[in-house]
Each structure stands twice: as C-alpha cells, then as structure tokens.
Amino acid sequence: MEMLLERPVLVLNRLWQPVHTCSVKRALKLLCLGHAQVVQTEGESRYQTHDIGSWVEYSGEAPSSIAADLIHSVKVALCAPKIIVLAIYDRIPRKEVKFTRQNVFLRDKHTCQYCAKVFIERELNLDHVHPRGKGGKTCWENIVTSCIPCNTRKANRLPREVGMRLLNEPRVPKWRPLFGLKEQASEQAWQEFISPDRQKVSIAL
Ligand SMILES: [Zn+2]
C-alpha cells in the first residue's frame, strides 16, 4: 500500500503535454481538491478523464487487470492513477531541475565538455571548472561532465592553464518538461504521451 502510494504518476498540463511526475498520493490529493482529473488508461473509454466522483465509480467496476492497483480506505476503494491531467494551468509544478550527478550528465548530453566525446555514465566524471582547492563551488555553473582522461589531465588547474577549452559554458538548465522523464518512464501507459511520435495519438479533448 505504502509503495503503491509512492508510485509515480505522469502529470499532463491542460494541453495534455507531459510536464512532470508526482506520487500516487499527490495525484489523489490533486484529484480530491479538483485540481486534476485522472486519465483512464485501460478499457474502451481509454483517455476519458475522471473527477473524484467518477473515479470512485470507475474504481468500483475496475477491470481485473488493475485490481492489484486498488487503494483501500475505510469507505472506498480507489484505483491508483497512472496519468492525471491538471485542471488549472498555473498549478503546473515548475520544479527546478535537481542538481545531481545524473542531471549534470543529462544537461551535457553525456558529452565530455573538454574533448567533446560521448561516453557511457560510468566512464564519466564531474569536473569543477574552477578547482575546488581554489575556491570553486559545487554548483551548476561550475560543474561539467568530463571523461576520466580529461579530468585527470586537467587535475587541480583552470582549463586555460592546461590549454583546455570548454565545449559549453555551464549553466543552470532551464526547466524542460521532459528533463529526465524518459529515464524514469517504465510505465507502458505513459509511452504514448512521452514518445516523440505521440502526435499520432488522437485525443478527444
Ligand atoms: Zn574528455
């Protein structure tokens, strides 16, 4: 139950564009507040949207294929949503892109910012452009993706001291709706919304 409540739900904006993910718990809260509707992902009326009332009803007649996703409370049983669509445009959660090792690699497209070659994750390192030992901070603007040989070559020096140049000036990534989403999209029901050919899917709005 606890795990089911933490499962990710795809969040669509009013234009049915994927913007984010949230937990089942948060999705149900938004649903109860009337800030979002659930997008039905199974059955004949696939893509139909539900408010809390009709979702309770739908959950009561839930097909056996999703019976395992039922959340039981004292009074009602609710299906865990897989996709929700926000009712209020301004409520799109514009979370900042988290500063993590993996997100730096994503920002730099897994490309060493010194030799411009693409590497797999385990062959990459994070490099402090302005070395830490010389007061360089650990932040978006001072951390770049680097391959291990370049990282070793640069060591504790500034790029210009070793005749190295940065491919791109490191910046805080601008919010991109799909930032990192593909990497966590294991849910089949999401595919049509996040794959590049999603335009082919016709949705009755
Ligand atoms: Zn390199």
Image (spheres, rainbow, N blue to C red):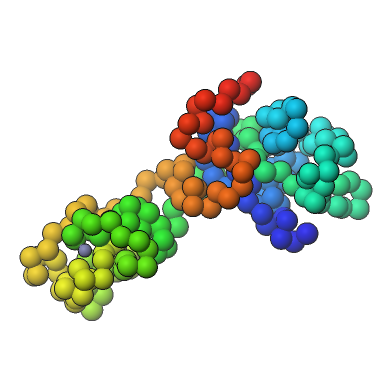
Q: Quadrant of the C terminus?
A: top right
Tag count in the figure?
0
Give the side of residue 174 with respect to residue 60, left or right. Answer: left
Q: Quadrant of residue 45?
A: top right
Q: Which residue does the image show at 32% across and 66% down from the upper left?
A: 124
Of all residues, the one furthest to the right in this rendering is: 75
Rendering coords of residue 144 (x, y %): 28, 61
Which residue does the image show at 63% across and 40% down from the upper left?
A: 189
Q: Is residue 18 left or right of residue 71?
A: left
Farthest residue, direction top:
204
Q: Who is closer to the viewer here, 50 or 200? A: 200
- Report the residue at 69% width, 50% height from top: 24
Q: Quarter containing ligand 1? A: bottom left
Residue 52 in the image: state x and y as whole percent. Answer: 79, 37
Question: Quadrant of residue 145 in the image?
Answer: bottom left
Q: Position of residue 18 (x, y in %)?
A: 53, 38
Residue 60 in view, yes or no: yes
Looking at the picture, does residue 195 appear above or below residue 174?
Answer: above
Res. 110 image quadrant: bottom left
Q: In the rendered image, is residue 136 in sight? A: no
Quadrant of the drawing holding the N terminus: bottom right
Residue at 83%, 43% (x, y): give it.
Answer: 64
Q: State left or right for residue 154 relative to residue 140.
A: left
Relative vertical location of residue 88 with respect to residue 171 in this rendering, above or below: above
Q: Give percent across and percent down for residue 107.
A: 35, 52
